[in-house]
Amino acid sequence: MAEEACWYVVHTYSGYENKVATNLETLVENRRLHDLIQEIKIPTEIVPEIKDGVKREVERKLFPGYVLVKMVMTDDSWYVVRNTRGVTGFVGPSSKPVPLTEEEVAALGVETREAAIDYKVGENVEVTSGPLEGFIGVVEAIDMDAQKVKVKVSMFGRETAAELELVQVKPL
């Protein structure tokens, strides 16, 4: 297949995000469109909520009225998504939906990319971005799931622990 799948933003009726996602997944299953429509996501976040004096964690949609779909844009895939019940259209000019850029996908945290790292615990690394940019530290721990690295940096004659993104450090 020549075309690569991209993430598109689909506009839905408010409150229909889950229904649209479920309907699309069912259509993909029934019509065997796995190669065209690969992933369907509704970005959410967990926020604390106090109701009747009780604090609890609730899941909230980051973009109410929108569903993200990773798909190869063809006439067939466009038609299937566009005519799913609850969908009002794609984000972009009406003639051609616009895919999200790599930067937008990364910022939304839709895909978990495996960061290839070339350093290990105990090795010296240089911080390449953020407030500690330019400092050199020793890797204390690496958390691949959270995409974080713990680094002990020496500043002002003291050891300071810092938790950074994997991409914020490079080996020396």
Image (tube, rainbow, N blue to C red):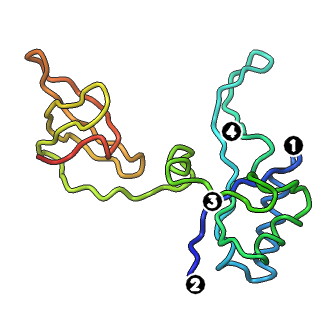
Label 4 and label 2: CA atoms lie apart by: 33 Å
Q: Which mark is residue 41?
A: none
Q: In this rendering, is residue 99 above or below 148?
A: below
| 149 horizontally vs 67: left or right | left
Q: Earlier in the sequence, mark 2 or mark 3?
A: 2
User: In x, y percent, where is residue 47?
Assistant: 65, 30
* Cα–Cα gap, marks 1 and 2: 34 Å
- In the depicted structure, whether residue 119 falls above or below residue 37: above
CA separation in Å, label 4 and label 1: 13 Å
Identify the residue position indicated by label 1 in the image.
14
- Badge 4 element: loop
Of tags 4 and 2, the one toward the viewer is 2
Lower sequence index among marks 4 and 1: 1
Q: Residue at x 22, y 36 (%)?
A: 127
Residue under numbered circle 2: 1
SS at badge 2: loop
How crowded pointer 1 is (Cα within 10 Å; few <14, some 14-19, many 20+) is rated as few
Q: Earlier in the sequence, mark 1 or mark 2?
A: 2
Q: Which is more foreground, mark 1 or mark 2? A: 2
Work out which residue is located at the far right of the displayed protein and give it.
Answer: 85
Name the amino acid type tagged 2.
Met
Residue type beneath disc 3: Trp
* Helix, strand or loop status at disc 1: loop
Front residue of 131/147: it is 131
The nearer-to-camera label among 3 and 4 is: 3
Neighbours of disc 2 within 10 Å: few (<14), some (14-19), many (20+): few
Residue 7: mark: 3
CB atoms of marks 4 and 2 within 8 Å = no
Q: Is residue 69 left or right of residue 139?
A: right
Q: Residue at x 91, y 61 (%)?
A: 85
